[in-house]
Amino acid sequence: MNRTGQEYRKKYPIIRPTIVKELAHGIAVSRLARGVGERMELPKDECYELSLAGLLHDIGKLELAKYVYGKENETLIIEEMRYVRRHSELGANILQKKGYSQKIVDMVRFHHENCDGSGYPRNLTREEIPLGARILRVCDVFAALTADRPYRKAFDVKTALETMIDEAKYYDVGVFMAFMNFVNEEKLETILDTDELEHSLSELVRKGQITIAEFLGEREAPEERE
């Protein structure tokens, strides 16, 4: 890699995903998505699917990591970014092969679409985007903003919400209002605090007691009790 590429990478580091970080982020998104779904009074089975899709929405990044990251001769930055943008499609394909419902597959495939058509992979707009994916989009952004990243510290909740309001054109209005109601009424510390969870997951991964494959088996929604 030339000097310009090295300097660029140092200034704008590409995230190296790990099982622990992705699962912790997925659990935060899962909790948020289920809460928003319940605020929108969606059926219990749909809230369950939202929760599961939230957990697995970035599963494609872990598969992608085998091809993009950790090479002796690293690829060009622009090529890397193109590959990273494939993670939603790749994740959806993985889940489809594993027998997940089409709703969950579509949520994962389209969770980076924006209502103004600026997202990926298909540049869909508004109702073209499945409702579940619109919910995941909002929850994914909030969970990312309120978590530490290699290139910045976590935003506090107030700053994260202000940032999202400034970018409201990306989100479904009804979903965003339900999300705002949820975060203003719930104790977000419990939902967003994944430090202890990351530590526990790290120990399980270190001991070889947990792998990402364990999260890819077929899952069915629990039967509703009378």
Image (cartoon, rainbow, N blue to C red):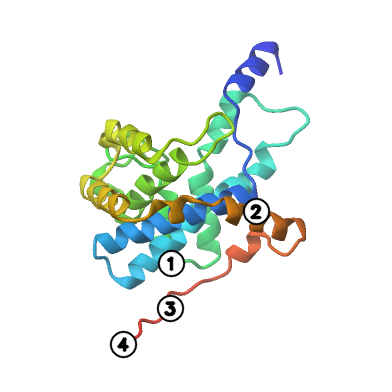
Is 122 in front, or is 205? Answer: 205
Q: CA distance from mark 4 to mark 3?
A: 12 Å
Residue at image mark 4: 226
Please report contact status of discs 3 and 1: CB closer than 8 Å, yes or no: no
Residue drawn at x 54%, y 38% as measured from the top left:
148
Circle nearer the N terminus (3, 2): 2
Of labels 3 and 1, the one closer to you: 3
**Circle 1 is placed at which residue position?**
101
Front residue (pair 211, 205): 205
Residue contact between numbered discs 4 and 3, judged by CB atoms under 8 Å: no
Measure the alpha-carbon separation of dots 3 and 1.
Answer: 14 Å
Q: Which quarter of the rendered picture does the N terminus lie within? A: top right
Residue placed under numbered mark 2 in the picture: 199
- The answer to the question of whether label 1 and label 4 lie on touching residues, with beta carbons closer than 8 A, is no
Residue 209: give x, y in percent of width and height: 73, 65
Relative to 172, 107 lies left or right: right
Residue 69 falls left or right of residue 163: right
Q: Which amino acid lies under the numbered mark 3 shown in the image of this protein?
A: Pro
